[in-house]
Image: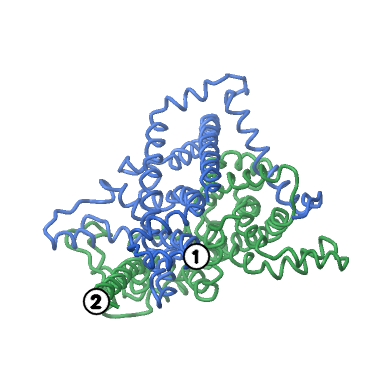
Amino acid sequence: MKKSNQAWLFLAPSFIGLIFFVFLPFGDAIRRSFTTAMGGKFVGLSNYETVVNNQAFKMALANTVKFIIICVPLLLLFSLMLSVMISSLKKLGGLFKTSFLIPLAIPVSSVFFLWKVVFHQNGLLNILLSRVGVEGFDWMSTRAFPILVFSYLWKNVGYDMVLWLAGLDTISLNLYEAASVDGANAWKKFRYITLPGLLPTVYIVTVLSILNTFKVFREAYLIAGSYPRDDSIYMLQHLFNNWFTKLDIQKMCAAAVIVALVITGIILLLQRLDRRFGEDI
Amino acid sequence: MNLLSIIKRKLNMLLLMVLSLITILPIWFVISGSFMGSGEFTQSFSAVLSDTSGKVSWPLIPNYPTLRSYIELLIDTPRFFVVFWNSCKQVFPSLIGQLLIAVPAAWSFARFDFKGKRAVLTLYIILMIMPFQVTMVSTYLVLDRLGILDSHWSIILPAAFSTFPVFIMVKFFKSIPTTLFEAASIDGAGEWRIFINIGLPLGRGGIISAMILGFLELWNAIEQPLNFIKTPSKWPLTLFIPGISPEKAGISLVASVIMLLPALLLFLYGGQYLEQGIMVSGIKE
């Protein structure tokens, strides 16, 4: 690779844009997080104290963390399963890939109507449940969290599946043949060839899956509005949105700094883990 | 081949079929619903839309298919065209901006080695992950200072500097064999010529992939217009459709179908690029 200062010429439009649209304004947000709304007097950490002690913030943070911890492993597992199933097919693989990717194309705004018809008290899901003798609920206002988990899985399973398939492609077929000769069964092959071979893919699939958890706010907002009746889906995204509507700039700045720090920490940690395990291979 | 492995293979196929049917069923519902007449529509959905008792039903194919809702939306709802045009005015300039800004940036990361590259690249990845809400207040502050809040520019400018397309395209540019560049520079081509004549044509797949993924993202954007555009006449489709009153839900399904069309066309004609774009982002450099 070429070592050159010309690199910066190519990078400049993007980097300068980021300075003006992200770094400088975020610096301004950091400054504001230490001052009062009126007069801009320095107040130390008091905005941060307000945020951390805020009931809504605690709840939203807990819900968001819970959502990520439940959804990301489920999605990784489920999409890995699909990709292994598809890669074992001799034909029709392309057709299945496309059908699992289709939810990416469905506009979020039509999910609003669809989900209403499916998850309403008189909706399709409850009709299905009553056929097998289970009492239904008004899912939207009492069980919104699982609906959101489902929406996330449904929307992103194809994306992650394609990522895993790319990882599976890099594993040499010779390894499997050699294992067959040695008499290894399907599970042993999966455990000792497929899984280690997919390790380099784990980091990026995890990062992109976390990125996509934040976008579930779109569905949540369209289905349940700014203040969902079911508290369990009140996420940090709702909180920021509502503070923004009230122009609570000081609180938002402090909360933005906290969340930005946490996310940066998680990325750096994942990167370090990735490097440690990546080197083993 | 023994019986057991044949059974296993059939089961695998069956399970995949069931799962993929469940995945695409919603899209079928939207399309079939858009062809229902208002009578059938009310009959099918009143249990949900006006909270009356009774059960909802959704026939796989409408009993009396009609284009009534299409006519009502396309002819009797002039506002729809305004909103559709708004979506276009926000999405396509954003994509052009991403092309002009992200392509050279990705080239820089893929082609050169420079001091601090690793740190800058990590910074780009962090920015890519950062949810919109975290940078919302700082973006708001800068848009306010520029005086472009409540205009299409408030969507376009921040989107143009997105780092996601950079991330996708770096991987594609890296897969171009370096010997090509060496040959070109021996022939006396400057870096700019190499970028234009070798990088762009050979990285085309990456550029198209990034544009498709970018389109799907921007076409569905809700957070940005919701917070930065207050005037309803400047809203994109994503905010217009949920605002359609429940009595006119038939129209909203038609609007959804129309909104879905460009994305489906992309799947049909750009499917392999979309797939490649996702695949390549998973490969480690």
Where B239 sits versus A22, above or below? below
**Residue for badge 1:** A172
Mark 1: secondary structure: loop
Looking at the image, residue A271 lies above or below residue A46: below
Mark 2 neighbour density, 10 Å: few (under 14) some (14–19) many (20 or more): few
Quickly name the residue at label 2: B3
* Relative to A260, residue B285 above or below: below
Colouring scheme applied when the structure was drawn: by chain
Report the Cα–Cα distance between label 2 and label 1: 27 Å
Could you tell me residue A70's position as x and y percent?
A: 35, 45
Name which residue type carries label 1: Ser
Can residue A258 be seen here? yes
Asked if residue B272 is positioned above or below residue A9 in the image, the reply reads below
Q: Residue furthest left?
A: A133
Instruction: Give, as a three-letter code, the residue at label 2.
Output: Leu
The colour applied to the residues of chain A in this rendering is: blue
The chain ID associated with circle 1 is A
A168 left or right of B137?
A: left
Residue A161: where, in percent of width, then height?
43, 61
